[in-house]
Image: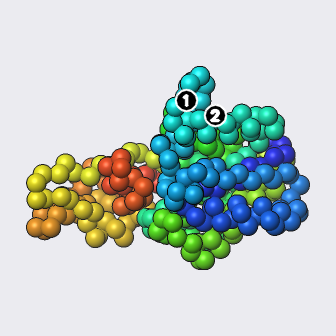
């Protein structure tokens, strides 16, 4: 596994200013990466959305990189066009072996490493978890969803997601955490970047794998349901049947009725309101790296 080039992206979502700040900072301070043996490139993914202070202009850029949509000859939305431009530019520069994409969440997610579950990604994520307190690894099987992300342009990638932080806010603590986490990913790439596949670890414990998204309940007049305050505290904590999920202004509660020991994540994430997603469910597992 030879890693020669790493792309670090921020501002893929225009209202997540931690990554935007760090891309500007590192553009002026390239020496921060001069000790690494690989080449590092920086990308401010969606400058127009950043200027508008919005997640996106027309649609989520992080859902525009699927081959089918990127190869469409006549993109009309800003982000479809942008994804095509980013990909063309990326390919013309010889691509990258690894992408780090910086994101923030309004939900109390701590530091979450979002990966497609292959062995190299798992090895790097596990390396980071052993060095940075409070890191969780959130793994997805390869799917149209993972392959629509900006980070799908490279064979290996990590999305670093830190929260809670409001949208359009510079938060010093979050920026320092992001800087530390990205540096740890780069250290991990240094540690494993010239290992053969065989030399990489094989077993990975306590990985959270994606199960499904859960929608807000249907709204009827006068009884809009909100996330229950008990659930607000439960990112990465197991829930069981009967635990309260939603509550309305009258105090009516909707309890959990699904499989025990799944864990909610991205609870009450602001960016998911437009998709009516209340939270996602993940399962804690030991994974065998593929
Ligand atoms: Zn984001």
> As rendered, which of 35 and 171 lies closer to the eye?
171
> As rendered, which of 271 and 124 lies closer to the eye?
271
Rendered image quadrant of residue 17:
bottom right
Residue at mark 2: 84
Coloring scheme of the render?
rainbow
Query: What residue lies at 54% left-to-right and 44% top-to-bottom?
Result: 62
Pinpoint residue 258: horizontal percent, then vertical percent.
Answer: 27, 49
Q: In this view, does 191 lie above or below 95?
A: below
Q: Give the structural element (helix, strand or loop) at label 2.
A: helix
> As rendered, which of 114 and 78 lies closer to the eye?
78
Relative to 239, 96 lies left or right: right
Pinpoint residue 58: horizontal percent, then vertical percent.
Answer: 47, 43
Pinpoint residue 266: horizontal percent, then vertical percent.
Answer: 42, 58
Crowding near the residue tagged with mark 1, few <14, some 14–19, many ≥20 C-alpha atoms within 10 Å: some
Residue at the outermost top position: 73
Query: What residue lies at 78% left-to-right and 51% top-to-bottom?
Result: 41
Using the rendered image of the protein, determine whether residue 260 is visible from the camera's viewpoint: yes
Cα–Cα span, label 1 and label 2: 8 Å
Q: Give the structural element (helix, strand or loop) at label 1.
A: loop
Residue at the outermost bottom position: 172
Query: What residue lies at 84% left-to-right and 45% top-to-bottom?
Result: 4
Closer to the chain start, of discs 1 and 2, is 1
Q: Residue 174 carries which label?
A: none
Q: In this view, does 252 lie above or below 67?
A: below
Residue at mark 1: 75
> As rendered, which of 229 and 287 lies closer to the eye?
229
Query: What residue lies at 63% left-to-right and 44% top-to-bottom?
Result: 151
Rendered image quadrant of residue 223:
bottom left
Quadrant occupied by the N terminus: top right
């Amino acid at each position: 596994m030879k890693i020669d080039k790493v792309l670090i992206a921020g501002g893929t979502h225009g209202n997540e200013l931690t990554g935007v700040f760090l891309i500007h900072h590192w553009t002026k301070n390239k020496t921060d990466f001069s000790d690494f043996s690989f080449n590092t490139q920086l990308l401010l993914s969606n400058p127009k959305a950043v200027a508008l202070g919005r997640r996106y202009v027309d649609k989520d850029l992080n859902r525009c990189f699927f081959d089918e949509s990127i190869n469409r000859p006549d993109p009309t939305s800003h982000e479809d066009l942008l994804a095509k431009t980013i990909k063309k530019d990326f390919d013309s520069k010889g691509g990258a072996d690894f992408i780090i994409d910086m994101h923030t969440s309004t939900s109390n997610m701590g530091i979450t490493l979002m990966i497609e579950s292959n062995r190299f990604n798992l090895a790097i994520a596990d390396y980071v978890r052993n060095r940075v307190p409070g890191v969780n690894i959130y793994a997805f099987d390869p799917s149209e969803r993972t392959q629509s992300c900006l980070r799908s342009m490279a064979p290996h990638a990590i999305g670093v997601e830190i929260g809670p932080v409001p949208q359009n806010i510079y938060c010093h603590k979050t920026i320092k955490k992001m800087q530390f986490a990205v540096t740890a990913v780069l250290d991990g790439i240094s540690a494993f970047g010239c290992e053969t596949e065989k030399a990489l670890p094989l077993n990975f414990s306590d990985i959270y794998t994606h199960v499904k998204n859960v929608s807000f309940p249907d709204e009827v007049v006068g009884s809009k349901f909100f996330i229950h305050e008990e659930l607000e505290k439960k990112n990465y904590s197991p829930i069981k049947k009967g635990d309260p999920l939603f509550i309305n202004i009258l105090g009516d509660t909707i309890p959990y009725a699904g499989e025990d020991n799944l864990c909610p994540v991205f609870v009450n994430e602001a960016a998911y309101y437009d998709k009516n997603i209340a939270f996602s469910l993940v399962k804690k597992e030991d994974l065998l790296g593929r």
